[in-house]
Amino acid sequence: MKMLSLENELKENSYPGRGIVIGKSPNGKFAVTAYFIMGRSENSRNRVFVTEGEGIRTEAFDPSKLVDPSLIIYAPVRVLDNKTIVTNGDQTDTVYDLMAEGKTFEESLRTREFEPDGPNYTPRISGIMEIADGSYNYAMSILKSNNGDPSCCNRYTFTYDNPVNGEGHFIHTYMHDGNPLPSFEGEPKLVPIMDDMEQFTEMLWNNLNEDNKVSLFVRYINIEDGTYETKIINKNN
């Protein structure tokens, strides 16, 4: 698979929707993830990321303007033991709860499907990172309608064992802007990761569409000891 420029993938797409990047730093020291949200409506844009425990959640920037919280207020990131779960909806809680009961990532997501927001039927994208005894692996998933047909849910899981230094994968909800919004197609895109967290965060934020970007979360996890550093940027301050 050809490695793509993450900078260009963001810069050239005015509306990828919500996106997850997971990978490994070039120096091999860090498991890296990023999650961003975008919005076209006032309700979607009226959000910020806030820290909650070891994870984050979305909340309304101006509560008086919150219309429908069902698909926009959720915990995108939660940590279960040595596993970091990153998703674009309340399936974060599903994965957390069912994996705590002994289910696998894929089994947990079998209980969910794409979002009920026809005609878009926004895909549910999810990722999980597992770090144990100095080793690291991750998986990504997408649950999507069958070419816009909600009677069928297509499920794809991609697993990456012993990730290569400097490589990551990027999955997002929409191919591009449109009405209805076209769902992501194909495998997660192979993209480069950076050693410098500040530089990586800045590159992501600066290349998201200025009108549509809302919030960005980036985390670098030390593979040796599990400690981590987090950056959050909110357009609404």
Image (cartoon, helix red, strand yellow):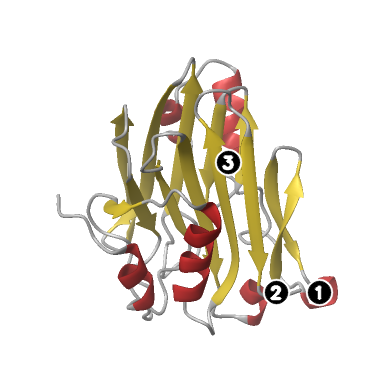
Question: Mark 2 touching mark 1, by CB under 8 A?
Answer: yes
Tell me the element at label 2: loop
State the residue at coordinates (37%, 42%). 141
Q: Mark 2 highlights which residue?
A: 46
Is residue 170 shown left or right of residue 41? left
Q: Quadrant of the C terminus?
A: bottom right
Q: Tell me the amino acid under the disc marked 2.
A: Asn
* Mark 1 lies on residue: 62
Give the mark nearest the N terminus, 2 or 3.
Answer: 2
* Rendered location of residue 16, percent (x, y): 40, 69
Residue at the spot of label 3:
92
Q: Is residue 206 left or right of residue 77?
A: left
The quadrant where residue 28 appears? top left
**Is residue 206 at all visible to an observer of this figure?**
yes
Q: CA distance from mark 2 to mark 3?
A: 21 Å
Residue 167 in the image, given as x and y percentages of width and height: 31, 45
Residues marked 2 and 3 touching at CB (< 8 Å): no
| Depth check, front residue: 85 or 220 | 220
Does residue 180 show up? no
